[in-house]
Image (spheres, rainbow, N blue to C red):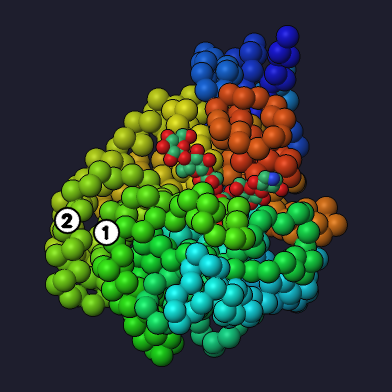
Amino acid sequence: LAQEPVPSIALNQLGYWPASPKEAVIIGNINAKRFYLLGANADTVYKGDLPAGRKAELADQIVRIADFSSFKKTGRYKLYVPGVGSTPVEIQKNVFDHLSKSVIKAYYFQRASMPLDAKYAGKWARAEGHPDNEVLVHPGAATSKRPAGRKISTPGGWYDAGDYNKYIVNSGITMGTLLSAYEEFPGHFDYQQIDIPSTKKGLPALLEECLYNLRWMLSMQDPDDGGVYNKCTHAHFDGMVMPAASRLPRYVVAKGTAATLDFAAVMAQASRIYRNQVPSFADSCLQASRAAYKWALMNPAVAYDQDQLNTKFEPKITTGGYGDHSFEDEWFWASCELYVTTTETVYAEKLKQWLDKDFQIPSWSNVHMLGVYTLLRFQAPWGLELASRLLDYAKTFVSAQQQNPYGCPMGNQAKDFNWGSNANAANQGVLLIKAYQLSNDRVYLDAALSNLDYLLGKNATGYCFVTGAGQKSPMHPHHRPSEADGITDPVPGWLVGGPNTGMQDRCKYPSKLPARAYTDQSCSYASNEVAINWNAPLVYLTNALVALKQT
Ligand code: G3I
Ligand code: 9MR
């Protein structure tokens, strides 16, 4: 018999802005009719009624929302529900300030090909891993000028996730999201101080960190034809070892259309952003982008199909595939970025073909929306139409929020809970921020905030899904350095994948229900891994909120 779950309180463990909606979710079949906010001396500073319980189907929980939005006084309180217990609540204007930096700092911890110095990395200092200066051209990627077994150099960049491989497709959406955050809120990032090494005086921390991955990406382009390799990888996933202990051969594998167009998009965007501060780098980016786009024109639909390649070439490669088979979204995104950067009509003509495509929250396999965001940012000719469609789309998330038992847009449908579901919540947040900027209607901002509440603890699992943040956060992410370093605390600032109905690993999950299919065990790569593309929308969301200051 399933045990009756212990009643609990799920809320944003980092806290709430004084001016924003404030909700906690009381989970369980309880008798209490009221909840209380207690001050430092256990004095009641606020009390509110609890509504009747509501069944949350996707978690099989009875939930009640404790709404204390009208209480606006800053301070540190306890939320108390008789028969359930109490939990701390913070109300401050700065509740997301530290988080907005630590989710960026996370990328520094992920750097390949350099040691992490204790000056920056603290107790997570470590030796260099993967110099990647002698990477083999895999037979599936061989050309006459770069035959199989030729050694090339492709150092630096960030490890993708809990593994030590570097994938262009996933770097694409990651860079697009991070660079877009910068382009939307330059004033905020220009003054942000983050403790990472500086290579260029005056370069904002976010751009400094992004530069590290952009330089790696540039080295993944074949200078002879402009095509871009899908990944720099071991043949197989490593065991749970530190980077320096992972020494098996590295390969660059087949070029592909998705990788090459994602690369073209990112480099076109980078060439705008680094133009003033690092002009020669900006020139190289634009040149690389154009060359990649040309390769794609000649190779418009080359999928990376790892199973297929493994029937033809040795060694077989079994690391992440990121095997995308539809390219319209990559064509659109690359054309948008090149159009905005160069204003050349060829790119405008191209992107027009896909302007009418339905909107979807971005994912590594669907980057269409990144193009839309860029067109809107630069007030491209189609801006009005796109803006009104974006607001219509954003409204669907607002109504999802109104229907959701936990009060967030995230999690009304089982399909919200796929591999990396937490990134859906963050990407919905990014979209809602855009809707807020376009309309100035606070309802969108509040919906974005409520998805951040979801990620920081107001969810069916009660976890704050970011390492090192909140009272109950993942301690055993599927992240090789965190697992192998002998340090109790995982590397901080990382969003884990989150509940995943697929449960594709062989871990034991406490529940198989969509909203609760999460387990804080390092075996759980399907629910508890970290990844650069999942952190990126959280970087965007948290920094946008801090920049907008509607506290
Ligand atoms: O495309 C199908 C769709 O048609 C179907 O309706 C749906 C229902 O399950 O599945 C879709 O495929 C999913 C695919 O992602 C595309 O979204 C697969 O089930 C799912 O298993 C697959 O998960 C990917 C996972 O790798 C396994 O390949 C994740 O998106 C992706 O984020 C993850 O990425 C890994 C890298 O390979 C290696 N590094 C770590 C990284 C994070 O876990
Ligand atoms: O560690 C790997 C993780 O980064 C990937 O997301 C995941 C899915 O591709 O695979 C993990 O590796 C596992 C492999 O697929 C199966 N054997 C156990 C590996 C975990 O240590």
The residue where tag 1 is placed is 332
Q: Residue 77 falls in which quadrant of the image?
A: top right
Rendered location of residue 278, percent (x, y): 44, 87
Question: Label 1 CB, ligand 1: below 8 Å?
Answer: no
Q: Residue furthest front?
A: 312
Decide: is 188 above or below 152.
above
Q: CA distance from mark 2 to mark 1?
A: 8 Å
Q: Residue 344 falls in which quadrant of the image?
A: bottom left
> Do we see residue 181 in this rendering?
no
Report the amino acid beneath label 2.
Gln
Question: Label 2 CB, ligand 1: below 8 Å?
Answer: no
Q: Which mark is residue 535?
A: none
Which residue does the image show at 44% across and 56% down from the upper left?
A: 304
| Viewer-side residue, 433 vs 134 | 134
Q: Residue 486 falls in which quadrant of the image?
A: bottom right
Q: Which mark is residue 353?
A: 2
Which SS class for mark 2? Answer: loop
| Viewer-side residue, 272 vs 364 | 364
Which SS class for mark 1? Answer: helix
Report the amino acid beneath label 1.
Phe
Which residue does the image show at 51% across and 28% down from the upper left?
A: 406
